[in-house]
Amino acid sequence: MNTTDNKKVAGGRIGIGKFFDERIKEFVETFNRTNKQTFDLFEKTLSLYQATSVADAQLRVHDIIESSLSALQVNVDTALKTNAKIIADWKELVDGFDLAENRYRSGAL
């Protein structure tokens, strides 16, 4: 292996590191958002016990249901987008290995 080949291999490692860094960052952001959603829903649930009338309790339950459905929609959308990114990144990674293998077999590396 010559110097150029070593740089290509190192570049591949950097690409993999970037891949994992981006996914970890997204995971942390998603975790923090869902954690906040959980606390918000828990606070709304506890506020039911502070309702002063049946109408007030109904409004609070309605708010909890709307908030829960909104959080569910955001979480499903995030999961779908994250999965699509992961699939695209893995495809790019595998395609890079295929290209390197083809170059190796053809004697270009």
Image: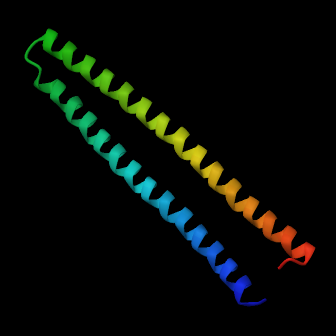
Q: Quadrant of residue 9?
A: bottom right
Q: Residue at x 76, y 66 (%)?
A: 97
Q: Residue at x 71, y 84 (%)?
A: 4
Residue 19, above or below 71: below
Residue 109 percent coordinates (x, y): 83, 79
68 or 2, nearer to the observer: 2
**Could you tell whether 45 is left or right of 91 in the image?**
left
Residue 58 percent coordinates (x, y): 21, 13
Q: Quadrant of residue 63?
A: top left
Residue lying farthest left? Answer: 52
Residue 51, above or below 95: above
55 or 77, nearer to the observer: 77
Residue 50 percent coordinates (x, y): 10, 25
70 or 44, nearer to the observer: 70
Q: Residue at x 19, y 32 (%)?
A: 46
23 or 39, nearer to the observer: 23
**Could you tell whether 105 is left or right of 30 in the image?**
right
**Could you tell whether 45 is left or right of 4 in the image?**
left
Image quarter hosting the N terminus: bottom right
